Amino acid sequence: MKRISFFKFSRLLVVAMLVFGMTAIFSSCKDDKDDPKPDPEIVLDGTYVVGEATALPDFDKKGMMKITRNEVVQEERDGLMELYVAVKAGAAGFNIIKVEGATRTTYGPSANFAKVDQGTVDEPKIPFWRGSLEATDTKFTVPADGLYHVAIDMGTMKVVVVPVEYWGLIGAATPGGWGDDTQIPPQAFDLNSMTFELTNVTMTKGDFKFRYSGGWKVELDTTLDVGNGNVGVKINTNYGGAVSALVPGGDNIANDAPGYYTAKMVWKLGEGYTASITKTGDLSITDYSATELGLVGDGLMVGGVQHNWDETVMLQTPAVENETNYTWTFDGVEITTLGSFKFREGQDWNGKSIGFNDVTMAGGAAAKFETNADGNFVPLEDGLYDIVLLIEAETETYTVTVNEAGAVPMIWVPGDYQGWAPADAPTLSDANEDGVFVGTVEFPDTAPSFTFKFTSQPNWDGTNYGAGANPGELSTDGGAGNLEVPAAGTYLLTVDVNNLTWTYELQ
């Protein structure tokens, strides 16, 4: 047998040890690369809806609740949060989890969280759930698949879960007036997105809002002092502001174009709602000859006593001209700055109602009124006023002319001859209060031109009358051209605002 020298054996042993060591090193590096330690889960601070019955089985930014307005003061309140979320029926349910750094607190319903079969008069007209919030793994559950409004107030530890059975249109522009919802029903149930849609809705000129399940608000607390004499914590269940920019509890939305509409509300998880009101056809001309309108509100004084929002006063049918112009006249109306008012049909809110945002103001006292979030007429000065409402049904335009009681109605004649300054312009008067204004105006030969317009108040905020399609005709179109007399001189001008005509005669 051939022998291996000790020297050669030692050299082979060293090589083997080196190879084994290097293999171990590379194997160790490979193991580290293939099996890295997992990164810690990162969840932003916030309050989340999490549950197997939703599209949010784990923490998701789409499930983060958002700060919202306290309806009592219509201002955001710290700790008052909401989320609209689709939920499946059954025991899987959901929890509300608050994340603060490494601390996570899971909340669920307390023992007093219970079904409310009938809320207060302004709350949704369907059963919902209300009670206290507590730290527990017990889940919130619902009896039916649907979209739900979940809101909590961490200051009072109160919670509500309200079904969004339908969205509704409500207001003067809608078929039910301010008394009843025109319901926009939901389409197919889906955990991530749902559409509510209604076609062929009749919309007249007027204001309106969106609200769900027939309610304006939901109460979480009714006793908490939130400052300045205001009490309670409530969430809005209505949207106003603008169709393209919805605001919880926002101002009324004005509809200026009567017609048939398709109304739609689209909810997407984590994004909230988008709305659309799309006109699909024109309405026929409305006959208002039998429509009784009067005044209602706490901005009126009746018999020396501040009035209310329950009884409509001075109800009357209109005078009718040209079969399409309707005029209601209210003389000697006593107004107080302690409140506001509207025009209303009959003795409830199911018919027509007209607010400040629906009309063009005219008359010498027009600037003494403004509006509020409810679209009411808000007086700026106490006094006695003569008020005339004109509806031109052919164009569905509304004009309210206000003058101090007993004052002769006027229109102003600003033009190039006097610097286009309505407040300093000559006036024409309607001595018979029949819509025909008469007066003389001098056009000096030094004037740059003899062009002018008529305006219903001493500024450009009222109805402005310019040139119509034919000589002697007037137009209230904002783009209407100027009127003109042929040369310098003093002219007798006559304006008929009912028939939109005018004449001039050199004196």
Image (spheres, helix red, strand yellow):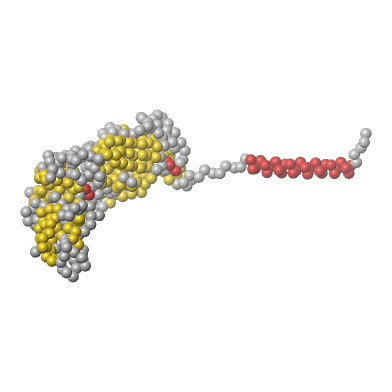
Quarter holding the C terminus is bottom left
Residue drawn at (43%, 42%) of the image:
62
**Image: 418 above or below 285:** below
Q: Give the side of residue 35 with respect to residue 287, left or right.
A: right
Q: Does residue 5 appear in this view?
A: yes
The answer to which image quadrant residue 219 occupies is: top left
Q: Using the image as rendered, state which of residue 93 and residue 391 is in the foreground.
A: 391
Q: Nearer the viewer, residue 41 or 61?
A: 61
**Closer-to-camera residue (98/261):** 261
Residue 365 visible somewhere in the drawing:
no
How many marks the image carries: the answer is: 0
Residue at the (22%, 42%) spot, across then down: 204
> Which percent across, then down, holds residue 475?
20, 53
Quadrant including the N terminus: top right
Q: What is the quadrant of residue 274 in the picture?
A: top left
The residue furthest right is: 1
Q: Is residue 428 left or right of residue 421?
A: left
Q: Residue at x 13, y 50 (%)?
A: 498
Horizontal and vertical percent for residue 324? 15, 44
Q: Residue at 12%, 45% (x, y): give it.
A: 322
Q: State whether residue 462 is above or below residue 121.
A: below
Q: Report x, y in % for residue 250.
A: 29, 47
Q: Is residue 485 left or right of residue 224?
A: left
**Front one among 325 and 128:** 325
Q: Position of residue 415 (x, y in %)?
A: 19, 63
